[in-house]
Image (cartoon, rainbow, N blue to C red):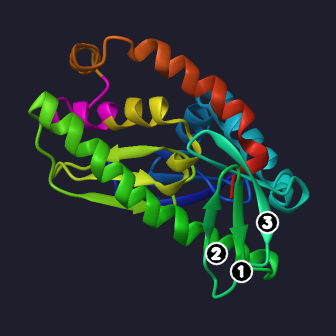
Amino acid sequence: MEYILVYKNRKTVAIHIQKNGEVEVRAPRHTPVPLIEEFLNEKREWILKTQKRITEQKENHNKLMDANEVLFLGSLYSISLGEENNVIKFCKNRINLPDIDFEEKKRLLIRFYKKEAVRYLKERLELYSGLANIPYKQIKINSATTRWGSCSSQNGINFSYRIMFLPSVLIDYIVVHELSHIIEHNHSEAFWRVLESLMPDYKQRQHQLKEFTKTMFPYVF
């Protein structure tokens, strides 16, 4: 397996799959190459799976234009062009966009999704934070492609704007998942017990998330 090796001042070996599918290994200085390649071999299945997902995303990159639809909160909306002043408007089962080139349209949609993510996720976080009595520090929206959300060591919660592709029931699962990390900053058995206490049907939602993710690639941007 081809890979880029980068030695850094760090304590552990980590693998990063770049946007073009290349494998970058970040390792502590003086780590023997045989140990690095043994680690790569252990992670081979995950690497290939991630590269496959990246390839599928590239192949479907222009489906936004081909399918003429966008995915928002789990529902598909047909694109209608002609809106003025770079404004996005929803009208029943349609989304009205300005008639601009593809890249501009994508940038406009990303800004819209990020704005909606802030509004929507604040509401959901406030709801579940209050119900569970788990305070969080802040919310941030990013463009992450490999994770829906994360919880910082300072109890700030981050979400990818792409979470807005998902149905609300799955967004709620991710919200509660990240809130649970404020109690347990890991994926230990204790973490899963916390999550189950807050959302007893989390396993069902977790499975639904995996299945929904398989179908949404044509609409990801």
Residue 132 picture quarter: top left
Furthest residue to the right?
66
User: Mark number for residue 120?
Assistant: none
Circle 3: residue type: Ser
Q: Quadrant of residue 167?
A: top right
Mark 2 surroundings within 10 Å by alpha-carbon count, few (fewer than 14), some (14 through 19), many (20 or more): few
Name which residue type carries label 1.
Glu
> Bounds of the magenta span?
176-187
- Element assignment for label 2: helix
Res. 104 mark: 1
Residue furthest out toward the front: 92
Q: Is residue 1 visible?
A: no
For the point 61% across and 67% down, the residue is: 89
The residue where tag 2 is placed is: 107
Q: Nearer the viewer, residue 92 or 21?
A: 92
Q: Which residue is mark 3?
A: 80
Secondary structure type for disc 3: strand
